[in-house]
Image (tube, rainbow, N blue to C red):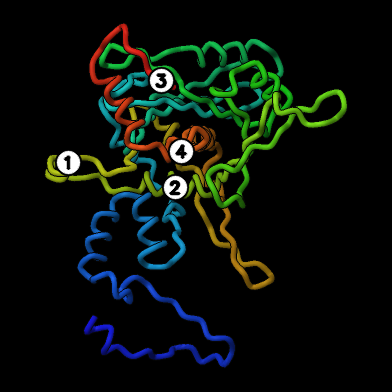
Amino acid sequence: MKMLGLGKWIATSTSDGIAGFHLNELYSPWKTIVEVVVDYLEAKDDIELYKVFVNTSLGLPFEHKGGEQPEWKLLYERREERAEGQVPPEVLLLTCGVDVQKNRLEVSIIGWNRKRSWLIEHKRLIGDTSNEEVWDDLSELLDEEYDHPNGEKIPIRILGIDSGYQTAKVYEWVRKKSKRRVFALKGRDQLDTPVSAPSVIDVNFRGKKTRAGIKLWKVGVSGLKSELYGRLNLEKPTEKQLEVKGYPKSWIAFPQTDEEYFKQLTAETCIIEKLSSGHAKYRWKKTYAENHTLDCYIYAMAAYYVIGANKWKPEKWEELENYYAEASSDKILTS
């Protein structure tokens, strides 16, 4: 308070137009500098908490440092001693992202708990996507359950599939599935949220949209790529740091996946383009021929947001933690 009382506002702008002011939490008489520092230290290693700190304490818009393209070799070298398809004991939830190509479906299954995520496996379902066979393969994959280390089976909770290619086939497949487990999506670069409210696709014989039909979710792919790359760029903790604090929140772990997976996962970089109006915009540019594993991870992240897992209360996560804490054949998990 004494410091604030002795302070003096010094204008730095030479403009004689409308005055604008920016104040962060350091100016607040209800918050000490020590408290602000403590908030920063608690948030700096947690992307979600740090986002809140930047927005509320610093009074600034948050920008992910995700435009910094991760080094694929570093990610490859830090793989866990875990086979693809093996579920770590910490995993409580599985989501799936699907990218549609002419001759195959690219599929990533991602495991989650309240703090971290794991690539479980990436699959390629080979087949002409204009025919039924490969879609039957995808149905079989959706129905598969993975072995959890504690003796339980863990299913894919929700699957998101891109509808940008083979749109009619995607809608046809989604229409046959439970709306609670499968959704069609469409990427939008300019969308500033991970997902937006879904739009109704199906219409009845009168030409009116029917709520009973499928819905299309728009996905903010640019923001999700930034979020993903921010997580991938987290510095690996030292052995001492692991003993004290464990892995940082938002840390992503990978199994013994091949090099091609990581080359595709890091296949884009965010660049700034200046427009003729004088403004600038961010644009994602490919630096590697294929980016399917990146797309699949983004779609699996979108699925996490669609079911609202990012907003689950601690009690929901505790229920899952208790369920997978020990094997039992007669346990019931509420949806």
Residue type pointed to by label 2: Glu
Q: Is label 4 in a helix, a strand or a loop? A: helix
220 over 303 or under it: above or below: below
Q: Which residue is mark 1?
A: 242
Q: Which mark is residue 265?
A: 4
Front disc: 3 or 1? 3
Residue type pointed to by label 1: Leu
Residue at mark 4 to residue at mark 2: CA–CA distance: 13 Å
Q: Is label 3 in a helix, a strand or a loop? A: loop
- Of the numbered discs 1 and 4, the one sitting upstream in the chain is 1
Which residue occupies the foreground of this view, 174 or 56? 56
Residue at mark 4 to residue at mark 3: CA–CA distance: 34 Å
Which residue is located at x 71 percent, y 24 percent?
213
User: Quarter of the image holding residue 202?
Assistant: top right
- Of the numbered discs 3 and 2, the one sitting upstream in the chain is 2
Pointers 1 and 4 in contact (C-beta within 8 Å)? no
Which residue is located at x 20 percent, y 68 percent?
34
Which residue occupies the foreground of this view, 105 or 57? 57
User: Quarter of the image holding residue 135?
Assistant: top right
Q: Which residue is mark 2?
A: 227
- Of the numbered discs 1 and 2, the one sitting upstream in the chain is 2
Q: Which residue is mark 3?
A: 334
Residue type pointed to by label 4: Leu
